Amino acid sequence: MSSTKPEKATPHNGNVALNNEASASDTASAPQQPETVEDVNSQWETRISRSRKIVYYYNRATKESTWDLPPGVDPSKIKGYGEVTVQQAQNINPLEGGAGQIRASHLLVKHKGSRRPTSWKEPTIKRTKEEALEVIKSYHSRITSGEITLEELASTESDCSSAKRNGDLGFFGEGQMQPSFEEAAFKLEVGELSEPVWSDSGVHLILRTK
């Protein structure tokens, strides 16, 4: 994958359970390798980074994302190619959701088995999966008791880069987050806090805000 991987959430980048982050998912099984050039072309589509407001390329099969046109790919065969102009991209407001989108904040606790066991807080995360669950449970108790809000905790304790936004992921729709994260988030009512939710990134608490 390209070293210049686009942000994913707000586009939510960092370690949010983004689909584009490979972070997409991934409770799903590994995708099969394409057999023909046509197969390769059909896997790619264009999307827009809400944070940088520019177009990037996303592979629906491998969950790979890149700012640059993927090698060997015919741009004219990419879904959405040419349909989104720079001006349209610049008009996107991450604070205004589109049809079928919700908005949520989250708090992520990683463990040494996470897809990327590092964060802005710790260069190398060494806690076990079991320890991560205990930590997230303690956060859940503190939030539900009214001691502290998820946003307050996320700003200092979340292993996701969204901590700088108090855990806010902005608006997102189906297919943008890891399946387990997406399923849990869309089931929540506005203002409702989830139980611990596992993804390849770690374990999350999700608060639906809109």
Image (cartoon, rainbow, N blue to C red):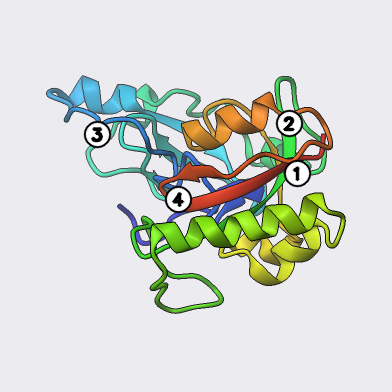
The one of 175 and 133 positioned closer to us in this rendering? 133
Could you give the CA–CA distance between mark 1 and mark 2, rounded to whole angstroms? 11 Å
> Going by the image, does 66 lie left or right of 180?
left
- Residue at image mark 4: 67
* Residue shown at 39% from the left, 45% from the top: 22
Is residue 14 in view from this perspective?
no
Of callouts 3 and 2, which one flags the residue occurring earlier in the amino acid sequence?
3
- Residue at image mark 3: 30
Helix, strand or loop for disc 4: loop
Between marks 1 and 2 in the image, the one whose residue lies nearer the viewer? 2
Of callouts 1 and 2, which one flags the residue occurring earlier in the amino acid sequence?
1
Helix, strand or loop for disc 2: strand
Between marks 2 and 4 in the image, the one whose residue lies nearer the viewer? 2
Could you give the CA–CA distance between mark 3 and mark 1, rounded to whole angstroms? 31 Å
* Residue shown at 82% from the left, 32% from the top: 190
The one of 70 and 127 positioned closer to us in this rendering? 127
Amino acid type of the residue tagged 3 in the rendering? Ala
